[in-house]
Image (cartoon, helix red, strand yellow):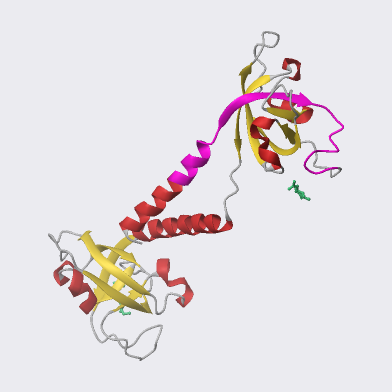
Amino acid sequence: MGVGTKVLVITTMAICLISSAAYASEGTATFYTPPYVPSACNGYKNDGVMIAAASYAIWNNGAVCNKSFRVKCTGATNQGTPHPCRGGSVLVKIVDLCPAGCQATIDLSQEAFSQIANPDAGKIKIEFNQLREMGIEMRIFMMISIVLCLCSAAVHAAQGNAVYYKPPYSHSACYGNQDNGPMVTGVSDALWRNGQACGKRYRVRCIRGANQAPHPCKPGKSVVVKVVDYCRQPCNGILNLSQDAFNEIADLDAGKVIVEYNP
Ligand SMILES: *[C@@H]1O[C@H](CO)[C@@H](O)[C@H](O)[C@H]1NC(C)=O
Ligand SMILES: *[C@@H]1O[C@H](CO)[C@@H](O)[C@H](O)[C@H]1NC(C)=O
């Protein structure tokens, strides 16, 4: 992935995260006690106890039914219980309407309220936000982006020593006596993976010398090589390039250089 694409992906992810964080609103919460059915959203269906009733401030004609809210206690609303908050937050599902005359923005179940605050307070200040239900496309996009970023970061980090060997290149662990041309390489155990590496192509770039040879790298040069061979231990490099491939990116006199390689 190019740097431009990566920046775009990271920016998109940051915006997604920030916009869901910025969604938090402030309000107040009270609580109500069982029975919790029937509810305005779901009639006699049992929705458990981590539930809440929405006041008209957020009811939105019932559109808020079944939506999940994260609610956090932020402070007291009265002198009776000056420090009601217990820390943390609670996740509740809206299943009911707290009708006109409702004393708070959200009327939590007693169980939900007591997770975040002392019920003696009766009413608290809260910060709440509706959990964004990301569309499935958005979720897939985010997951693919994250995977791509991780993969390309891993790929870009790959560095190691490269050595070279002289022709003929035609006898190889992967292909027997088949000729694969001059742009070939052997790989050591780190990349060999029981022969699964055979046929893989790497773009290889020299980044600096691995010994006393001054300035062995040919600036701006890279070469694509095909894996045809296994470099048996003790292999002096992670890549054992053909002499032709090595010569494309570095001075042969160096014998060994540090390279960056990616698929
Ligand atoms: C809420 O979700 C339940 C399923 O969990 C569904 O049966 C019910 O119709 C939904 N209620 C509303 C108002 O969308
Ligand atoms: C590089 O590969 C060749 C051919 O397989 C092998 O003979 C040679 O020993 C390898 N070089 C090193 C330094 O491992």
Q: Is residue 157 left or right of residue 108?
A: left
At 39% across and 87% down in the image, what residue appears? 175
Q: What residue lies at 30% left-to-right and 73% top-to-bottom?
A: 240
Between 63 and 51, the one nearer to me in the picture = 63
Q: Is residue 237 magenta?
A: no
| Relative depth, front residue between 134 and 201 | 134
- Residue positioned most to the left: 214
- Ligand 2 shown in quarter: bottom left
Start-end of magenta stretch: 15-43
Residue 209 can be seen in this image: no
Does the rendering let one see residue 261?
Answer: yes
Total labels drawn: 0
- Which quarter of the rendered picture does the C terminus lie within? bottom left
When the figure is inspected, residue 72 is found, relative to residue 233, above or below; the finding is above
Question: Which image quadrant for residue 115?
Answer: top right
Q: Nearer the viewer, residue 153 or 159?
A: 153
Q: Quadrant of the N terminus?
A: bottom left
Residue 51, how many percent across, how many down?
A: 75, 36
Image position of 65 (left or right of 137): right
On screen, residue 88 versus residue 196, left or right, reads right
Q: Percent position (x, y) of residue 228? A: 36, 80
The image quarter containing residue 130 is: top right
Residue at (15%, 66%) from the top-left corner? 218
Question: Residue 260 location in percent, x, y?
Answer: 29, 62
Furthest residue in direction top, as rendered? 79
192 lies above or below 219: below
Could you say where residue 125 lies in the image, as x and y percent from the top left?
63, 21
31 in magenta: yes
The answer to which image quadrant residue 49 occupies is: top right
